Amino acid sequence: MPKPPRITQKPASPAARLLSWYDLHRRELPWRARAGATADPYHVWLSEIMLQQTTVVAVASYYRAFLARWPTVDALAAAPLDDVLAAWAGLGYYARARNLHRAAQVVATELGGKFPDTAEGLRKLPGVGPYTAGAISAIAFDAREAAVDANAERVLARYFAVEEPLPIAKPKLRTLGQSLVPEKRAGDFAQAVMDLGSLICTPRRPACANCPWTEDCVGRARGIAERLPLKAERAVRPLRRGAAFVASDAKGAVLLIKRAENGLLGGMLQPPLGPWTENFPSAKAAISQAPFAADWRKRAGIVRHGFTHFELEIEVYSTTLSKRPKIEGRWVPQDELRAAALPTVMRKIVAHALDEGGPLFSDRLSKISRA
DNA sequence: TAAGCGTGGCT
DNA sequence: TAGCCAAGCTT
């Protein structure tokens, strides 16, 4: 009886299996090149900065707006920083926008408008750290670099059953990630790991049955995949409280002042605010915090906002003036508030004072739902 | 090194 | 609802 032909096909490497999965299931994203094409470095860089600690859904509309307004790195470099901050308003982590603008100027003026094509060179740009340098060099230049973000850390911690908690495990995970990068298609591999983390190897209830790495995933074999990666405990967020002062002139323009260039919400606009302390100021104390004497009326209710490292509650005082006092700041007409460099927390405060939940937010919300 | 730095969606 | 989580970097 003749022997059946043996199939001697070599088992595909983990990288090859992941790339095959990626070819079938890759996400279509605004900044992603068509299959087989290489993306524009400016597009990749812009998207990577926006995506730092930020979801794809939140980024999409901002990415499109930036690219439409500033189609090249030279155009972005030539823009006033305040315009960039205003366009970034609502996306958070505003140091990214300041660094984005500085990096654009470095590329435009010192590098002839060309982005560095190595991770080492990219790493020198402000706002580009180890992850972003690896991601841009791999995706835009096909450099053999890993891009180990939170998705990749989760995938790798499970695949190799790394039980050290984050952030202790970061260097180890980065090394493990680099060890898997294939000779070819490093950019696709980087994006494939992230898509795997986003679509299959999710924080909760990972879809292991559909995973191209399920057979050799050590975390799954040991039954511990879903609870990896372990993480250090978070510090409790303190609560801070204060008062805000929203003044309108006879035409409804609102007084806004510019925050310090660095630190929390650096370079962004706000209405005048009192100090943030453990308790709200009394009505009397609040009046002494106001930017000028006026008929300040306390609005009902409070504005709450959560930051990464503390929570904020604000009581809002408002006044309408027949005549503008002489005071430093900009009187911004109401129809310009939407496009102003107002971070979300300040937008909430102004909206609360003006008694609206509408125009200050509606445009952004509709953009997000369209994304 | 560890803390500072936004926001919105999901459970 | 309150906490978790997201394509991290800077100082």
Image (cartoon, coloured by chain):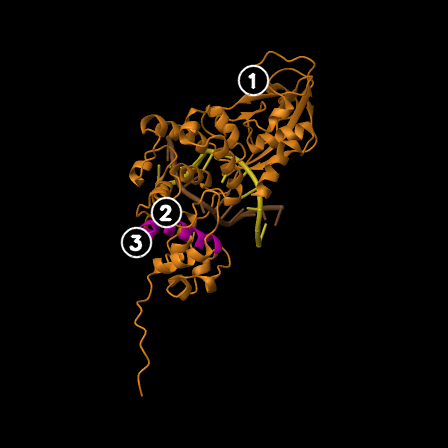
Chain colours: A orange, B yellow, C brown
Dividing the picture into quarters, in which one does residue A346 lie?
Answer: top right
Left or right of residue A228, residue A323 in this image: right
The mark total stands at: 3
Mark 3, residue position:
A179
Looking at the rendered image, the disc whose residue lies closer to the viewer, 1 or 3, is 3
Kindly state the secondary structure of the residue where label 1 is placed: loop
Q: CA distance from mark 2 to mark 1?
A: 43 Å
Mark 2, residue position:
A147
In the image, residue A323 lies at what x, y percent? Answer: 67, 12
Q: Earlier in the sequence, mark 3 or mark 2?
A: 2
Kindly state the secondary structure of the residue where label 3 is placed: helix
Magenta stretch? A173-199
Q: Main secondary structure of the magenta part?
A: helix
Residue at the (34%, 43%) spot, across then down: A134
Is residue A228 visible in the rendered structure shown here? no
Left or right of residue A234, residue A290 in this image: right
Q: Earlier in the sequence, mark 2 or mark 1?
A: 2
In the image, residue A317 lies at what x, y percent? Answer: 66, 25
Q: Nearer the viewer, residue A295 or B2?
A: A295
Q: Quadrant of the N terminus of chain A?
A: bottom left
Q: Quadrant of the C terminus of chain A?
A: top right
Is A367 magenta? The answer is no
Mark 1, residue position:
A329
Q: Residues within 10 Å of mark 3 (few under 14, many from 20)?
A: few
Q: Nearer the viewer, residue A63 or A254?
A: A63
Is A181 magenta? The answer is yes
Dividing the picture into quarters, in which one does residue A286 lie?
Answer: top right
Residue at the (34%, 48%) spot, across then down: A146
Left or right of residue A304, residue A148 in this image: left
Q: Are marks 1 and 3 in contact (CB under 8 Å)?
A: no
In the image, residue A52 lies at what x, y percent? Answer: 44, 41
Left or right of residue A206, residue A319 in this image: right
